[in-house]
Amino acid sequence: MSLLDILTSSEIPVRTRFGRWCQKVSLALDAIGADRNPDLLEASKNAVQPGVGVGSDIVLEDLRFNSGDVSYDSSTGIATLVPGRTYRLYAALYAISFSDGLNGELIVNWVNANTNAILNASVAGVFHPDTYTFGPNGQKPVVDAILRATLSTFRVKLRVTNATGTASISTASGLFITELR
């Protein structure tokens, strides 16, 4: 199974996919003789985060795995990366209980934690209620980006950058940060 198959398979749970991804990355690094293990981090929600709207930071308070030099503050949702390294920032989120059950929407982006500037607007997560009636009911529950950390972009977080109403972020949500080489 290729890395792409592992990451995109809807038949395999997110945590299992991440574990397989880590194994493949580790094997690849061993094969090229990397001198250290890559930075890897996994966090998930252990409680619903209610009332999330424009300007809300999404905090996944359960740090499940952390290896390497990347750090995560589970009280603020801020990940601190190592400048000069390249990372894949991946979040699979599940929004529920929209205040506007017909036209509600959340747009979530990875942002610079110091300035709240969007890191890449083309990789936003889009969330609608199941009863969404304003246009196509397209969900994009994944916020996935590649970032080369610099001195000005080494602290990152997930943030609601646009919304119609509010929603809650379910415990069926997680984030993964993987160093790429």
Image: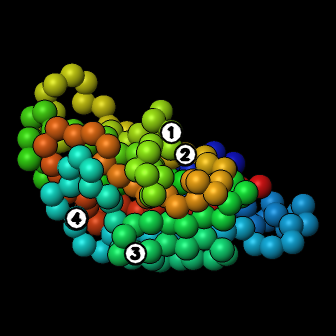
Provide the residue designation for mark 3: 74
Of mark 3 and mark 1, the one earlier in the sequence is 3
Task: Let me know if residue 13 appears in the view.
Answer: no
Residue contact at pointers 4 and 1, CB within 8 angstroms = no
Q: Position of residue 159 (x, y in %)?
A: 35, 52
* Label 4 secondary element: strand
Label ID, residue 120:
1
Residue, far right: 33
Q: Residues within 10 Å of mark 1 (few under 14, many from 20)?
A: some
Of mark 4 and mark 2, the one earlier in the sequence is 4
Provide the residue designation for mark 4: 49
Three-letter code for the amino acid on which mark 2 is drawn: Ala
Label ID, residue 48:
none
Which residue is located at x 22 percent, y 40 percent?
A: 163
Task: Note whether 64 is above or below 7 in the view shown.
Answer: below
Q: CA distance from mark 3 to mark 4?
A: 13 Å
Label ID, residue 145:
2
Instruction: Tell whether 9 sits left or right of 51.
Output: right
Residue contact at pointers 1 and 2, CB within 8 angstroms = yes
Which residue is located at x 48 percent, y 52 percent?
A: 112
Task: Note whether 104 is above or below 150 in the view shown.
Answer: above
Q: CA distance from mark 3 to mark 1?
A: 23 Å
Of mark 3 and mark 4, the one earlier in the sequence is 4
